[in-house]
Amino acid sequence: MDENRKEVFGEVDHLLAQARNGDAQAMDRVWSLMQPHLKQIARALMRRERHRTNFGTTGSGLISELWLRLVPNCNEVASAEHLLALARRAMRRILIDNARVHRANKRDHIRTPFEEALHKAGMDDRNLEAIFDGLDALEKEFPQPAQAFELYFIDRATQLEGAEIMGIDRHAFQRMLTMAIAYIREKCADD
């Protein structure tokens, strides 16, 4: 983590503690500090959307929707990293809901790049909700393989980039990714 990010995240952690103690202005400052990080996640997720969304192309609409969903639960946010994890999950859910509406309005189904990647990995891309439920379960039990899955399939990092982000070698990243795929496949098969 670079120094600027460490500094920002340290300040966000402090502000989150203030927000939990009732300081409403602290949460506003958290959101302004986290905007660049949230926009980066939103843009990465939006790039994978093949169809038009109601959120615009920059992800700012997605962040606005995220704000509406996360603000009532702001007292549950423990740290900047926790906020990013909650935001990533909430944005995925928002886009899944949007995709359901989109698919309901279309007769033919066209796969998004994310769905295509899942299909190539041998996963049934028709049930995204089960895949994300499996990812949530994986994250609780095995956080590192879940992070590898998110980096590769959701953030669209290459295996080498994912390994660098996680601070591991490429072969360890591949093992974690293989484990994550097998785990999520098994969870989807159980549903």
Image (cartoon, helix red, strand yellow):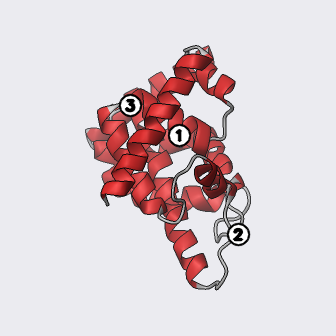
Left or right, residue 96 beside residue 184: right
| Residue type (three-letter) at the residue carrying disc 1 | Glu
Question: How busy is the neighbourhood of tag 3: few (under 14 within 10 Å), some, or many (20 plus)?
Answer: some
Q: How many marks?
A: 3
Left or right, residue 161 beside residue 138: right
Q: Which residue is mark 2?
A: 51
| Residue type (three-letter) at the residue carrying disc 2 | His
Q: Which residue is mark 3?
A: 143
Does dot 2 land on a helix, a strand or a loop?
loop
Q: x, y percentage for residue 42?
A: 62, 50
Q: Which residue is mark 1?
A: 150
Q: In this orientation, which residue lies closer to the viewer: 85 or 96?
A: 96
Displayed quadrant of residue 48:
bottom right
Q: Is residue 94 visible?
A: yes
Q: x, y percentage for residue 31?
A: 51, 44
On screen, residue 152 above or below 108: above
Q: Earlier in the sequence, mark 3 or mark 1?
A: 3
- Is the N terminus in the top left, top right, bottom left or bottom right quadrant? top right
Q: x, y percentage for residue 183?
A: 39, 41
Residue in the image at 62% along x and 62% along y: 61
On screen, residue 149 above or below 43: above
Q: Earlier in the sequence, mark 2 or mark 1?
A: 2
What is the CA distance from the residue labelled 3 to the residue labelled 1? 10 Å
Q: Earlier in the sequence, mark 2 or mark 3?
A: 2
- Is the C terminus in the top left, top right, bottom left or bottom right quadrant? bottom left
